[in-house]
Image (spheres, helix red, strand yellow):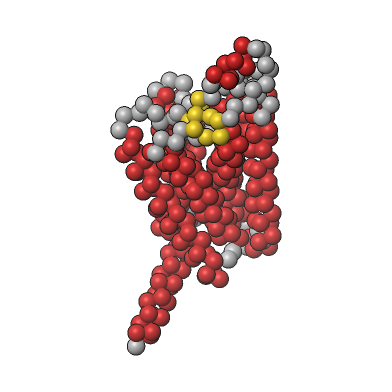
Amino acid sequence: MALINSAAENNITFVRPAYFIISGFIGIPNIRYYFVFLCFIYILAVVGNTLVMIVITLDRMLRSPKYIAVFNLAFTDLLSSSALVPKVVDIFLFNHYYISYNDCLTFMFFCFTSIFMQGFNLVVLSFDRVMAIMYPLHYQMRVSHKLILSLIAFFWLLAITLILIAAGLLTRLSFCKSVVIQSYFCDHGPMYRLGCNDNTPNYAFAGSALVIILGFPLAFIVGSYCCIGYSLSKISTFRERVKAFKTYTGHLSLVAIYFLPFTFVYIFGSVIHPNARIISLSMSTVLPPMLNPIIYVLQTQEIKESLKKLLKTRVTSKINIQQ
């Protein structure tokens, strides 16, 4: 810290600190209980998403374009949880608040890439659902494995490109004011605000990226469900409309779990207590990876049937071995 202050006093225009200090949860009462809760959430997320990936891999009936997107969502959720929760627990539960400059950028890269992909995966799933309801007779011709894989690859490339640009813009900043990041991980916004030179490009890019990762996916999903609602309104009986709509409740639940907390925090973040904001943001990043596999297992008949079949096969094989 003395080195940084000395650099500022000598009018050195560029200072790259050796480390940052992550201070997000420091000072919050009884926060250790929250970390125990995070560990519990992490275990459920790892088990749930791994189970979904295994079921889709083993059951050939689930190798449709839709379940390619579901597999990618489970993989992204697993990556997101593994990139964020163990490091956060290590930082705050074991008091390892210091993180090197390069490690901080790496931490930010994996966290944001996986968080971005969670939203983009919901776009792919929305596209699949709207095509299924709008073109039921031509769905298999219009939505192929190649198309879904191409969409997923494009969104992965987009997410990686966005975060690389964000990290690149951070490297041009001089951190001569402070090295204390007011967040629970190496968050782009709190980091660029520490810069003592012009951070206008960082601010402009953050606003543009927010539109791309939240505005565009949410607008597309809302538009797709307007189309779905219009198509379902043409079904003759109310009971059939309700039955058809139930097939989309799982995806709608995922959309609500992902977008509503972020939207609430970014709209009302300035009027809520900083500690409440940090807790809310952390919950919005760690809860979806845990809840997504639960929702898909409970709401998707194909996965439930596949899971039952795999469990039945395993039990039968054990009985045969014992005999």
Place residue 128 in its image quadrant. Answer: bottom right
Horizontal side of residue 145 vs 268, given as left or right:
right
Against 233, residue 88 (above or below) is above
Quarter of the image that includes the C terminus? bottom left
Seen as rendered, the residue at the extreme bottom is 323
Relative image position of residue 250 (x, y in whole percent): 46, 52
> Count of labels shown?
0
Against 235, residue 169 (above or below) is above
Residue at left offset 35%, top offset 28% = 28
Relative image position of residue 165 (x, y in whole percent): 68, 35
Residue at left offset 66%, top offset 61% = 145
Relative image position of residue 34 (x, y in whole percent): 34, 38
Place residue 170 in its image quadrant. Answer: top right
Relative image position of residue 129 (x, y in whole percent): 57, 53
Horizontal side of residue 294 vs 2, given as left or right:
left
Please state which of residues 113 and 122 is positioned toward the viewer in this rendering: 113
Please state which of residues 192 and 222 is positioned toward the viewer in this rendering: 192
Q: Answer whether residue 238 is visible to the viewer in this image.
A: no
Against 108, residue 182 (above or below) is above
Against 172, residue 80 (above or below) is below
Residue at left offset 67%, top offset 16% = 12
Q: Answer whether residue 101 is visible to the viewer in this image.
A: yes
Residue at left offset 58%, top offset 20% = 3
